[in-house]
Amino acid sequence: MTAPHRTVAVPDVPAAVLGWRTWRVGRRAQHRHTLFSPLTGTPWPAGRPMVATCASPRHTPPGDACPCGLYAVADTGTLGWSPSDHEVLGVVALWGEVVEGEHGWRASHAYPRFLVAGPGVSAEQRAVVTRRYGVPVHTAEVSPRVLARRLDRSTADVLRHVDDPTAAADLLTEVTRRREPVPAPRRRGWRSWLTS
């Protein structure tokens, strides 16, 4: 979906770290066009950066010995999900103070670069989120959780650095059409027959 994008104060790509993260779109009428953190339920502001907070007065986020900060990962297989059919997958720009971890980063400032919504998010919601946040919201025929599983590491790396919304949409369509690998059947040892 193409819509006019408004400018958000996100630094140039070389100054920002780009990572994957999830959100959910609100269900209630007053929040139907707001992105929320999936685990904490914190709303993300539209048109201005999300700024990390911490309950500790001893440091500013992200703290070295504290789990505070805004999270993103490099590998979509390590994402955290909420139990919601309004999940949204996306690439986020992280800047300010950024701490690298085993699976990704924690930062003091963040803003979405693009989003991917599945069938649970209506066309009307996608259009308004696009206008409010000023970022492209792509549509996937599968849930964002399934899409994340279908993204191999190299494709995920290419996608998170794509600047052209049309190129991102084309690549996402290709990934959506991929079939998930069928898991190999588990071998049952002789002891498993004793408990069957």
Image (cartoon, rainbow, N blue to C red):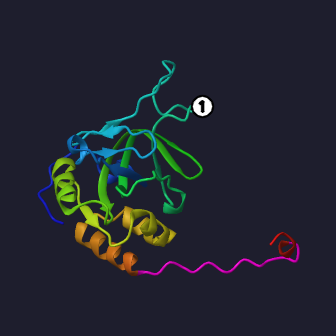
Q: Quadrant of residue 164?
A: bottom left
Looking at the picture, how far across and down is residue 55, in whole percent? 47, 23
Task: Please tell me which residue is depicted at 23% across the width and 71% down the height of the picture.
Answer: 166
Q: Is residue 30 magenta?
A: no
Judged from this view, the residue extending furthest toward the left is: 4
The residue pinned by badge 1 equals: 65
Quadrant (top left, top right, bottom left, bottom right) of the C terminus: bottom right
- In terms of depth relative to the viewer, which is nearer, 10 or 1? 1
Q: Is residue 124 left or right of residue 147?
A: left
144 left or right of 134 in image: right
Q: Quadrant of residue 122?
A: bottom left
- The amino acid on which the numbered mark 1 sits, given as a three-letter code, is Ala
Residue at the far top in the pictured view = 57
Instruction: Name the residue rendered at 38%, 62% in the picture.
Output: 160
Above/below status of 88 relative to 183: above
Q: Tell me which residue sits at (50%, 55%) in the image.
A: 79
Give the crowd class for mark 1: few <14, some 14-19, many >=20 residues within 10 Å.
few
Quadrant where the N terminus lies?
bottom left
Type of secondary structure dominating the magenta stretch = loop
Which sits in the foreground, 153 or 186?
A: 186
Helix or strand or loop: what does disc 1 sit on? loop
In this rendered view, identify the residue nearer to me: 108 or 82. 82
Residue 92, position as x, y percentages in the image: 36, 51
Q: What's drawn in magenta, residue-wise? A: 178-191
- In the rendered structure, the answer to whether residue 114 lies left or right of residue 158 reads left
Taking 94 as reference, is 86 above or below it?
A: below
Is 156 placed above or below 12 here?
A: below
Q: Is residue 190 magenta?
A: yes
- How many numbered marks have been drawn onto this rendered protein structure? 1
Residue 121 in the image: state x and y as whole percent.
Answer: 28, 59
Q: Residue furthest front?
A: 196
